[in-house]
Structures are given as C-alpha cells and as structure tokens.
Amino acid sequence: MTLPFPRHATIASLWLAAAMAFAQEHGVAERLYLSGDRAYAARSFAEALESWNQVLQQEPRSPYAARALYRIARHHADEGRPQQALPLIEKLKSEHLSSPWAGEGMLLRGSLLAQAARRPQDLREAMGEYHRVLDLFPDLPSAPEAHARLGQAWKDQGSWGRALHHFLEASRLDPRSLVGLQATLQAAELLDLTGDLQGCLRMLQRVRDLGPGTALAEEAGWRLAVRIRHRLLRGPLRSEGPWPGGRTKWLKTPTLLATGPKGELFIYQDDLDRAAELRGDQLVPVGPTGRNAKAMVAGPAGSPWLVLSKQPVLRDEGVLGTAGPAAPGGAFMDRWGTLWLSDAKNPSLLLVAPDGSSRSIPSPTAVALAPLPGGAAVLASDSNRSLHFINAQGQPQLTVPYGKDLSGPFRSVLSLCSDPLGHIAAIVDGGDFEGVVLWGPDGQVLRSATWKSLGISGKFRAIALDRAGGILLADRSNDLLVRLI
C-alpha cells in the first residue's frame, strides 16, 4: 500500500519542479540571447535579429525578452529606421516596465523624438521620457545621459538655469565618461552665456584635466585659449600678413568666407563662380556653382550653400525654397536646419525650413547677419548704424551703436562673422574708423584696429574667425587671405 505524501511535501515538490522548468526555459532564453549578441558583435545582423526574435516568441516573459526587445529597437534606430524602433519600445514599456531595459528604451525613445523635433516646442514629449527614466530608474547607468539630454532640451528652449542644473548633475554622476565630459563642456558654455566667464574657464579646464588626450579635451582647449586671448589678454591686433604660409596671388577674387561646424574654411571665388574648401594649403572645389553669390553658409552635409539675389538658395542637392531676399546681406543655419537670411532692402528676416517652406519675421534692414550661441543672432543695420542682438524668436535683446567704445564712428559693415563662443568680428568702413572690430557676446568691443595701424591695404570684403583666435580677411584686389592675431 502506497501512502500519500504529506500535503506540504507535495507543494514543495511542485515548486521544485516549477523552479527547475523555469531555470531550464530561461537557460534557453539566455543562450538564444547570447547567440544573438555574438552574431551582432560579428556584424551578422540578420542572424542576431533572428535569435532575439526567437527569445520573444518562445519566452516573452523572460528577463532576456526585455533585453532582446531593446537590442532590436536599438538596431533599427541606429540604422535610421525610427518608425520600426518606436513600436518595439512601446511593447518593452508595456510588458517589462519594471525592467531596467524599459528605462533604456525610454531614453532611446526620447532621443528619437528629439531627433525628429523641428523646433523647441517639439521637445516636450522627449523630455517626458527623460524625466521618467530619472523618476523610475534613478540608479540606471544611463541616468547621466538622461540628465545631459534634458540639459540640451532646456537649453534649446532658452531655460539656461534648468539646463545648467542637468548638465552639472550629469557631470557629477559620471565625470570622466564621454557623456560626463560633454555635459561639463556644455555647462561651461552656459556659464559664459549667463556672464560667468571665470566659471566657464574653470569648467573648460576641468574637461582638460578629466579627459586628457580626448577629442573633448582638445575642444575645451581651444575654447579656453580663444576666450583668454580675446576676453582677458585683449592685446592689440597685428597682421601676420598673407596666409597661409605667406601665399600671394593664389586666389581668384575671393569675396565670401564661411566656416563649418568643425572649423572648415570655405572661400567663394567670384571669378570661378563657386566655393572651395581650404584643406591644409590646398583648395578643393565644393558645393554648387552660382554667379555673383551674395552670401554663403556651411550646409548640414559639410558643403557650402550659396545665396543669390532674388533666387532660391543653391546647394548640392538642388535649390531650397522658391525665392531669396532682394538684397541678401547675410545667412546662417540654426541647429534645427532652418536657414536665416537677412535683407539689406527690406525690414525683415527670411527663415527657410528644411522642406523649403519659408516665413518672415520683422527686423531692421540688415546688411549682414551672424549666429550667436543659444539660438540668438546679431545683425548689422547700416540704416540706423547699429548692431542688433536678437533671440531665437527674432525679438530684440540689445542694440549697440556702430561707434560705441571706438575712437570714432563708422558708417557701414562690409562683412560680419561670429564663432561658436559668441565673438563677433566685422570689417567696417566709412567715417572716422575703417578697419576691423571684435565684439564680445555682450556687445562690448574687445579688440579693434584700423587698416593704418595694421599696416595693410587692400579691398577686404569678407571676414572669418578661426579656432586659434585668428581673424581671416579676404582681399579681393590682391587675391589673397590675411590673418590677424
């Protein structure tokens, strides 16, 4: 006669059997996931995705299912397929909300939404995802990145205090990582925007100390050196003469200069009807061909765009928009891909979106236009002889008369440029001061020189600032460039 097991023994055996089955099942899920991981590392993407999809089919509740969902979504995002990634992230959030991988998914969804944004107001949903990451998973390894992305979003919306808080928090949580160093660099720039130059310099030095040998340390180095040269030392400008390497008569009537996001220098040569990029001491033709270009701007693909009177903007991909200003005075592209154009004959700025649609905002008639950090801009108006500082919405912030802080007034701005640090340089003409002026982001004159004091002469019609703190001048009459330091 077989005696029955006691009830508690029966329950224990059932739990043991269930645990063994769970371990066996999830062992398969783990092996499938790791197989996909191996294939992905070998760039066998199709094999990796197949293995991860098997995890989802066979063990949808397994901890490895959450990881697989995230990895598949991440792959689609990295390959430029956000519409395939987003539904997977929603599934990850709904079925595995307690998993840290759901936090990673929220961060990924936020970054995809931010990439798709076309204006600051479009960042709200992305910011919601970043906040959820920090609320639900404060100890997630990616929490510093969530802080950094929130910092960028607040900066784009002009909330510099909130942006600075998140950048500093990202820097505190992971100071030596790429994210932490980038956040520290961003915090430095915000300190400068808020008028704390010394705090900015300390932050830049911190990036150099924490990331020696990195590209970010190099970036911080030039930003530090240029600010010291222009803001603290403020020595008299002097000419190095023809540049680079004393080359003379080597251009074909240079009339426009533009710099790219990595410091690339583009030179439009009027006799050739096109621009070239200076690489070392060689000119490489780039961008479209256009006769009598009035303004030039570095496009998002690293090639210059040309602005002609009353015509669409010319670019490698074809024309942008239907018509340009009657008398183009200046141009720049903001971080949203919108092209800003000034008009020397009409009191408005023309803003052309990436899809070619355009709108106008009121402004003084402007012979020149240049970008400033934080989405702001500066324009030069000869009609009222002032520099006008405006915010990202085109609203006036500051007006600086042409002759303020100089030995005498001037009547016109022939060319205007800026650098990523907010320094503004111009070739000025007419009146009692003819030469070069350098202003700070607050409109204060930092350095200036007349042609006579520099000991140079020519028909200078274009200006640019390089990353070593130099001022480049294009001399169309002598077919050369001159560098001031």
Image: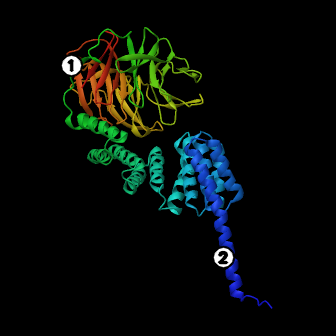
Q: How is the image coloured?
A: rainbow
Q: Is residue 112 left or right of residue 200?
A: right
For marks 2 and 1, give the one nearer the viewer: 2
Q: What crowding class fits label 1: few (fewer than 14 Cα within 10 Å), some (14-19), or many (20 or more)?
A: some
Query: Can see residue 332?
Result: yes
Kind of residue at badge 2:
Leu
> Residue at position x 60%, y 39% from top?
80
Residue that label 2 marks: 16
The answer for how far apart the CA atoms under marks 2 and 1 are is 89 Å
> Residue at position x 66%, y 71% from top?
20
> Quick one: SS at disc 1?
helix
Where does the N terminus fall, quadrant-wise? bottom right
Give the camera-side residue of 123 and 322: 123
Residue 461 appears in which quarter of the rendering? top left
Give the mark nearer the N terminus: 2 vs 1: 2
Q: Is residue 126 above or below residue 263?
A: below
Please state the horizontal and vertical placement of residue 481, each as a whole percent of the image.
31, 16
Residue that label 1 marks: 454
> Quick one: SS at disc 2?
helix
Q: Which mark is residue 83?
A: none
Where does the C terminus fall, quadrant-wise? top left
Q: Is residue 45 above or below residue 15?
A: above
Q: What crowding class fits label 2: few (fewer than 14 Cα within 10 Å), some (14-19), or many (20 or more)?
A: few
Residue 118 appears in which quarter of the rendering? top right
Give the camera-side residue of 337 and 51: 51
Please state the horizontal and vertical placement of residue 424, each as a whole percent of the image.
33, 30
Give the camera-side residue of 20 and 318: 20
Please state the horizontal and vertical placement of residue 381, each as a whole percent of the image.
39, 25
Q: Is residue 272 left or right of residue 470?
A: right
Disc 2 to disc 1: CB gap under 8 Å? no
Give the camera-side residue of 32 and 130: 32
Please state the horizontal and vertical placement of residue 225, each as a whole percent of the image.
26, 36
